[in-house]
Amino acid sequence: MDMYQNPYMAFPGITPEEMAFLQQGTADLTENQKKYFYMVYSSKRKSPQDILIFTLIGFVFVAGVQRFVLGEVLMGLLYLFTGGFCLIGTIVDLVNHKTLASEYNRKMAYESYHMAKMAAQ
């Protein structure tokens, strides 16, 4: 990775907080580990816009789609069978789609970090 070019800028919808978190979290990785981290994290990361789209799909068609995409299968099933908690939960997810994406991406960053540490040893 080129030190003058930030590869995280290519992520759609990245916030300054997420970028700072990623830079701080990968500071102790070697160049090969950073490349592996970037490859793994970019395949797992969800943009806030994607979560918003899936929530809108859940609002109009099948409630809980956004929760399945985020890997929350039990919440997805609960939303599915209750109509998104009578649409209230889906509306809350519409408002909080950035927070949902941020929490998911933080978990994926931790997983990717550990995978990069293990793979390049």
Image: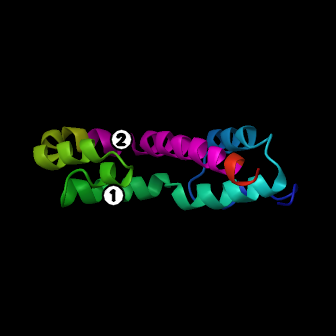
Residue type for callout 2 = Val
Q: Main secondary structure of the magenta part?
A: helix
- Image vertical order of residue 49 relative to residue 104, above or below: below
Range of magenta residues: 91-116
**Nearest the camera: 59 or 1?**
1
Tag 1, which secondary structure? helix
What residue is disc 2 on?
A: 95
Residue at the front extreme of this rendering: 121
Instruction: For residue 6, say whether it is visible.
Output: no
Q: Residue drawn 20% across and 58% down?
A: 60
The location of residue 81, given as percent across then percent down, is 12, 47
The numbered disc on residue 54 is 1
Q: Alpha carbon of mark 2 to alpha carbon of mark 1: how far?
A: 13 Å
Comparing labels 2 and 1, the label whose residue is closer to the camera: 1
Q: Residue at x 60, y 51 (%)?
A: 14
- The residue type indicated by label 1 comes to Phe
Residue 9, picture quadrant: bottom right
In which quadrant is the N terminus drawn?
A: bottom right
Residue at point 16%, 39% (across, down): 85
